[in-house]
Amino acid sequence: MHTPHYDFNKDFPIARKTEKQIAEFLVSKMDMKFIDECDNADYDIKMETKDGKQFTIEIKEDFSCERTGNIGVEIESWGRKSGIAISKATLYLYKIHEPSGRKSMYVILTPKLKRMIKDRLWHREVVGGDPGSNSRNYLFTLDVVKQNFTFLGTLPK
């Protein structure tokens, strides 16, 4: 099991690899076209459907769920809004390392995830992340994610 380093410079290459893996999955299994990737907080990748509809995706990988059963949604870091609070992505897609060992992908429209936060479907707020970042996250149980997100499939172990 991989755990985050809580060091942006070490975790960033892992995130990029995951973004590439997700884009390849969407191209090969969902018959989409990769358009581009983004290097700021707006979104991670842009895709296009067969009928020409373009959309952006914020990709997150949750390693901790394997041991905690929770999925974190970041809202603040380094004293500033971050994550879901500033994302311009159409969709949020999570690669979740489940307690079963399965690596599953779940997707949700960004406004729907924001509504889940507003409706307090999360069960706990935590602070963590890179040392000094004081990243604030809302924790959702895996069951709540499964009930509200769309399951896309699993990835090889």
Image: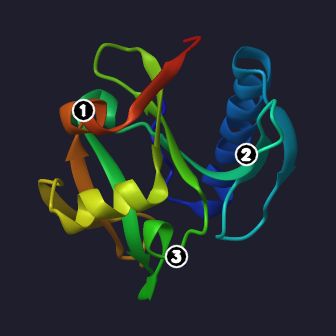
Q: Can residue 14 be seen in this view?
A: yes
- Tags 2 and 3 in contact by the CB under 8 Å rule? no
Direction bottom: furthest residue? 79
| Amino acid of disc 1 | Gln
25 relative position to 89: left or right = right
48 relative position to 72: left or right = right
| Amino acid of disc 2 | Arg
41 relative position to 91: left or right = right
**Secondary structure under the numbered disc 3 in the rendered image:** loop
Work out how far the residue at label 1 is from the one at label 3, CA to CA, in angstroms: 24 Å
**Secondary structure under the numbered disc 1 in the rendered image:** helix
| Amino acid of disc 3 | Ile
Classify mark 3: residues with Cα within 10 Å, few (<14), some (14-19) or many (20+).
some
Q: Mark 2 points at which residue?
A: 16
User: Quadrant of the rendered structure where residue 16 is?
Assistant: top right
Which tag, 1 or 3, sits closer to the chain's start? 3
Q: Residue 69 carries which label?
A: none
Classify mark 1: residues with Cα within 10 Å, few (<14), some (14-19) or many (20+).
few
Numbered disc total = 3
Which tag, 2 or 1, sits closer to the chain's start? 2
Residue drawn where x is 29% and y is 39% of the image: 148
Q: Can residue 1 be seen in this view?
A: no
Q: Name the residue under label 1.
A: 147
The spot of residue 125 in percent (x, y) is 19, 64
Q: Name the residue under label 3.
A: 86
